[in-house]
Amino acid sequence: MKGRKWYDGPIEINIEIHAPDMEEKKDLISYIGGVMDTLDGSHGPSFTYLPIVYQDDCQVVIGRQRFIKSSKIFYTLNIVFLE
């Protein structure tokens, strides 16, 4: 990976979901949870396998979610590496 590595420190994640309506029986917490799980690694007892951004979603210490009614469906994700 030429010196690239996942982040070990605290993370802030902000997501905006744009859509006509929320899916039935879904809330913003469900969406952010799925995004957070996608960005971390898989764990074994003594290792982390292929993290993308950070090792564990417990590193996320700040998170903001927002739903915006829109005719187009998309989302934006902003990740901040805190010190």
Image (spheres, helix red, strand yellow):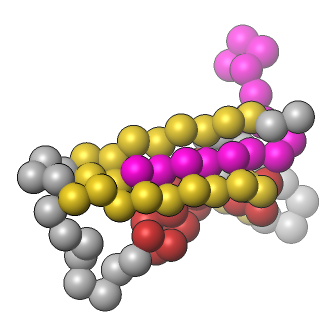
Give the residue displayed 19% in from the left and 69% down from the top: 21
Residue 11 visible in image: yes
Give the residue displayed 86% in from the left and 67% down from the top: 45
- Depth check, front residue: 56 or 30: 30
Q: In this view, does 25 lie to the left or right of 34?
A: left
Residue 56 visible in image: no
Q: Residue furthest bottom?
A: 25
Q: Decide: is 6 above or below 54.
A: above
User: Magenta stretch?
Assistant: 1-16
For the C terminus, give its image quadrant: top right
Q: Is residue 40 magenta?
A: no
Give the residue displayed 13% in from the left and 48% down from the top: 72
Horizontal and vertical percent position of residue 16: 40, 51
Q: Decide: is 32 above or below 59.
A: below
Q: In this view, does 79 lie to the left or right of 19?
A: right
Q: Residue furthest front?
A: 69
